[in-house]
Amino acid sequence: MALARCAVKRLVVGVCALLLAVTGGVLPATAAAQDLDPVATWNGLALESVRATRASDADAARSYAMVNAALYDAVNGIAAHRDRRDRAHLLRAPDGAPRYGDQHAAAVAAAHAVLTRLYPDRAAQFDTQLAADLAELGDSPRVTAGRKWGATVGSYVVDTRAADGSRPVESQPGGTGPGVFPSAWSGVQYRAMAPFAVADPGRYVAPGPPALAGLDYAAAFAEVALIGDIRIHDPAKVAHYQYWSLPAGSAQPPGEWLKIALEVSAGRSLPAKARLFALLGATLSDVSIPTVRTKYAFRHWRPETAIQQADTDGNPYTDKDADWKARAGSPGSTPEYVSGHSSFSSAAAAVLAGYFCADRRTFTHVTDSAPTDPATGRPMERTFDSFSAAAADAGRSRVVGGSHFEFSNQAGLEMGRDLAAEILAGKLLYTSGPTHHGACPL
């Protein structure tokens, strides 16, 4: 029996080697594997989990990054041992990866390992999905090896990020005086979280809002006082704000960009798609760090407070309106500068444009918070002719809603673009030969 098993093993290895030679170093996927889309399925579960737990934007971004880091490193680890060219890993080096492991099995097992640790109350759902995915792949040595490797990678990612500074939850107390955000807000520990990909998040902290007594501040004040006023009836502006509002209970702004990425990357191979989502997840989580750090440092007041207390700002060009209310319906729960919607959106748009080697890509999208179209009874769609146009639309919605000044929108957009550029230039590239950035396409 032992000799027979050895003979079978030698035969399997020989067949795999032949396949590698014929296919240029890549094992063909089984028919079952071709029907699976681990990136879509397991990101969908991550999105559902964020909605169900009413996670904050930074919490959500971290979760998405961990799922996609594990998924990518699991898939990439196997590829690194059998392809002629390999890509750099994000968190888990390919050491120990099975050369002939099934990449789909590795992907689903890695994502499962992360989500069950992040959301233990939803483990039964994740277990059911894992069992269904593995059943489609079949019970082969390749699948078993891939599953084992993926579970190892997923556990490694969770353990590595366990002490990353995202816990315990910290708060900044409310402040007093002109220009100061008056309420306490939580989640400020994210200002010191360890990044996934950038070298120094502090490089991207915004320089600060304009001086309260200056003309630039007065101009931004005048704009939002007009277009963000809830008393001025404008259905188009209400719909614009609501479309991008993405409050607790939604996928949050980072999740909305994952949804966009799923739509525009349909049909791509598992390794290519896993790389895109690892880049996107890392970028979205990393941009939360300077976003929170900037809010914490400047603790700037929201337009509603600023307009109601304009007599205290020392600016001769601003007028107090004690009855002014933001079109959004509330003043906002965190300091105003910078706009997180803007930083998340521009960071994601830059990653997508870099990955596809083109910003101009027309797509139609429905957000989690899209208002209902009275004519059709369905959520309202918006069509964009580029990724950057969608990011600009998301950022501008915060001014239209009376939640932010335009200078905070612009600072957030710049922050996201700059941070994404660092990640695209140096992460998940080929370890030898031409890289993606500098030589498009993939």
Image (cartoon, rainbow, N blue to C red):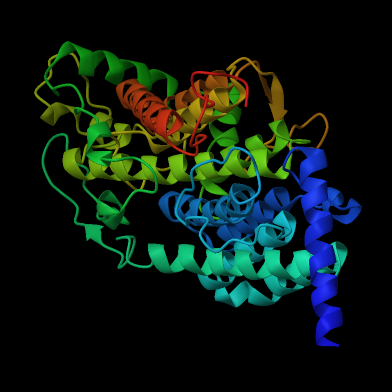
Residue placed at 12% from the left, 46% from the top?
176
Q: In which quarter of the image is the N terminus?
A: bottom right
Residue placed at 27% from the left, 28% from the top?
321
| Residue 80 location (% of width, % of height) | 59, 48
- Residue 380 shows up from this direction: no
Q: Please say if 389 is above or below 88.
A: above
> Which residue occupies the extreme front position in the image?
3
Q: Quadrant of the C terminus?
A: top right
Q: Please say if 97 is above or below 360.
A: below
For residue 375, which quarter of the picture? top right
| Residue 288 location (% of width, % of height) | 37, 44
Question: Closest to the observer: 248 or 279?
Answer: 279
| Residue 330 location (% of width, % of height) | 41, 43
> Which residue occupies the extreme right position in the image?
31
For residue 403, which quarter of the picture? top left
Q: Please say if 8 is above or below 111.
A: below
Question: Closest to the observer: 148 or 349?
Answer: 148
User: What is the total number of numbered labels drawn onto the structure image?
Assistant: 0
Residue placed at 65% from the left, 15% from the top?
385
| Residue 373 location (% of width, % of height) | 75, 32
Question: Closest to the observer: 271 or 142?
Answer: 142
- Residue 300 shows up from this direction: yes
Residue placed at 30% from the left, 54% from the top?
193
